[in-house]
Image (cartoon, rainbow, N blue to C red):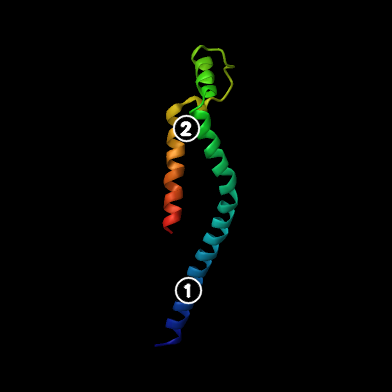
Amino acid sequence: MGIEDNVKRIADMEERLNRLNDFIKKAEELCGCMHQVSEDAEMLGEYLESSEWKEDFALDENGELPEDLKRGVLSEDGIWNSLEAYRELKEEIRKI
């Protein structure tokens, strides 16, 4: 075994260390966001099941809301799909 093998191994391990450290940094940033996102998911779920959502949806259906108002939250499937994707992501994180 020559020095070239050692150099190759060290370079490979250095790449792995850098990849791990990059992941840790990104994961720490994401964990910081998880608290806010968790609250957002909870409030969106409550909104979707509320009479307020139904009222807002009816206003949209009747054309009473401003045209330039973003209304993605009035898509029942849109909220439900996002909440389901969030639940699935949380389950995947728990498995790690």
- All told, the count of numbered labels is 2
Which of discs 1 and 2 lies nearer the camera? The answer is 2
Q: Amino acid at mark 1?
A: Met
Instruction: Count neighbours of disc 1 (C-alpha within 10 A) and say few if under 14, some if 14 to 19, many if 20 or more.
Output: few
Up the image or down, 41 lies above or below 77; here it is below
Identify which residue is drawn at 59% across, 44% down. 36
Q: Say which label, 1 or 2, has the lower sequence index.
A: 1
Q: Which mark is residue 51?
A: none
Up the image or down, 67 lies above or below 15; here it is above
Q: Where, by quadrant of the figure, is residue 25 drawn?
A: bottom right
Residue 42 pos. (x, y %)? 53, 38
Instruction: Give the residue pinned by disc 1.
Output: 13
Identify which residue is drawn at 55% across, 23% down. 52
- Per the image, label 2 sits on a secondary structure element best described as helix
Up the image or down, 63 lies above or below 85; here it is above
Identify which residue is drawn at 56% across, 48% down. 34
Instruction: Give the residue pinned by disc 2.
Output: 79
Q: CA distance from mark 1 to mark 2?
A: 43 Å
Instruction: Count neighbours of disc 2 (C-alpha within 10 A) and say few if under 14, some if 14 to 19, many if 20 or more.
Output: some
Identify which residue is drawn at 46% across, 37% down. 82
